[in-house]
Amino acid sequence: HFFDYNAFYSVFLAAAIFVLFKSINWNKLFKTDKSQRNISLISSCSFGIYLIHMFVLKVITHFSENVVPAWTLRIFGPFIIYILCLAAVMIIKKIPVLKKTVP
């Protein structure tokens, strides 16, 4: 596979995304307090998203194996997975018993 997590060049792909996001002037894009609160809320869920994203990826690929073409999953899959994981983490953070499992 050309895009595989275990390949040595995946480090360069990750570094390119990191440099892109680091170079964007976020204060200019998100001037209002509401948008800054929303970004802060989303960023507080990033570790939880990281913890569950592979599980969500496996579930999506299992159920969409013969239904969705591979190219559409490669293009739209990351956004769908991120949104699903974000929703799951936000729900988990609201449940008192589970809130401590996802910082």
Image: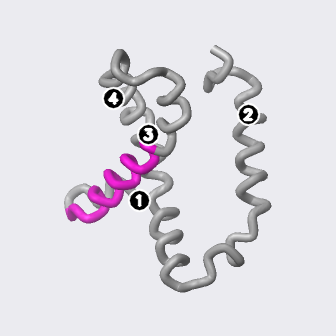
Closer to us: 58 or 69:
69
Residue for point 48% across, 52% down: 47
Question: Which residue bears the numbered disc 2?
Answer: 11
Instruction: Give the overall secondary structure of the magenta segment.
Output: helix
Q: Please state if 57 lies on the left or on the right of 92 as rendered.
A: right
Three-letter code for the amino acid on which mark 2 is drawn: Val
Few, some or many residues within 10 Å of mark 4 (<14, 14–19, 20+): few
Residue for point 54% across, 30% down: 74
Rendered position, 15 above or below 86: above
Q: Are marks 3 and 4 in contact (CB under 8 Å)?
A: no
Few, some or many residues within 10 Å of mark 3 (<14, 14–19, 20+): some
Q: Residue 47 got which mark?
A: none
Q: Nearer the viewer, mark 1 or mark 4?
A: 4
Q: Please state if 65 lies on the left or on the right of 10 as rendered.
A: left
Three-letter code for the amino acid on which mark 3 is drawn: His
Few, some or many residues within 10 Å of mark 2 (<14, 14–19, 20+): few
Rendered position, 102 above or below 39: above
Whole-percent x, y for residue 85 in the image: 39, 47
**Mark closest to the chain's N terminus, 2 or 3:** 2
Q: Residue 103 got which mark?
A: 1
Q: Are marks 3 and 1 in contact (CB under 8 Å)?
A: no
Residue for point 73% across, 36% down: 13
Q: Quadrant of residue 24?
A: bottom right
Q: CA distance from mark 1 to mark 4?
A: 23 Å
Q: CA distance from mark 2 to mark 3?
A: 18 Å
**Mark closest to the chain's N terminus, 3 or 4:** 3
Q: Which residues are magenta?
A: 80-96
Q: CA distance from mark 2 to mark 4?
A: 25 Å
Q: Nearer the viewer, mark 3 or mark 4?
A: 4
Residue for point 56% across, 84% down: 32
